[in-house]
Image (cartoon, rainbow, N blue to C red):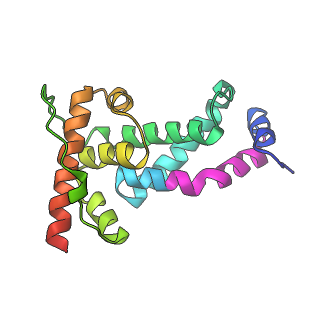
Amino acid sequence: MYTTESEILDGCRNGERIAQKALYDQYKSQMYSLAYRITGNFEDAEDVLQEGFLKVFRSIESFRGDSKAGTWIHTIMARTALDRVKSKMQFTDLEIVPEVADESNYLSVESEYLEKAILGLPDGYRSIFTLFEIEGFKHREIADMLAISENTSKSQLHKAKRMLQNKLKTEM
């Protein structure tokens, strides 16, 4: 019925359930992965996926096409996942940002060990690490999403990397 994403989006704007299902089916796997990486558990990721798509459908009129639909949905999903874990996060504002460790010292590890280590990080570290290193957000964007300073985002990323290095060294 729908051959292009533009047609799917138009159908969603008209409240057509088939179009909503088509958009959901097109992005559900990618968005579930994002939600899982940020929340750290399957149940929260499923809730975030459902809640995030409800937000997408409720605000579809505001999507003007300035970016790709996937980028717009990605941002909504990331913010929804962060809202889910925000209450668990603890941050300490720092005025001085520690030096970033030399990335050439990272161990070469298999992806399953790395994923397990990332999921084992505390909520704040895992969320910032995921947003910065995996999803490509900038520290300014992360700071805005989490209502923290840019330096806090940088220091939390630094601590997350250090903790990951230690976890991976002990698991290997």
Check the image and name the residue furthest to the right.
Answer: 1
Q: Residue at x 79, y 35 (%)?
A: 10
Confirm whether the magenta stretch covers residue 22.
Answer: yes
Q: Residue at x 31, y 65 (%)?
A: 114
> The C terminus appears in which quarter of the rendering?
bottom left
User: Position of 140 compared to 96: left or right?
Assistant: right
Q: Is residue 172 above or below residue 78?
A: below
Visible in this render: residue 138?
Answer: yes
Q: Is residue 135 above or below residue 97?
A: below
Residues in magenta, as a range = 16-32
User: Position of 48 compared to 111: left or right?
Assistant: right
Magenta region, mostly helix, strand or loop? helix
- Residue 70 is situated, as x and y percent measured from the top left of the image, at 61, 42
Foreground of the two, 51 or 107: 107
- Residue 13 is situated, as x and y percent measured from the top left of the image, at 75, 32
Q: Is residue 105 above or below residue 131?
A: below
User: Position of 68 compared to 16: left or right?
Assistant: left
Foreground of the two, 165 or 29: 165
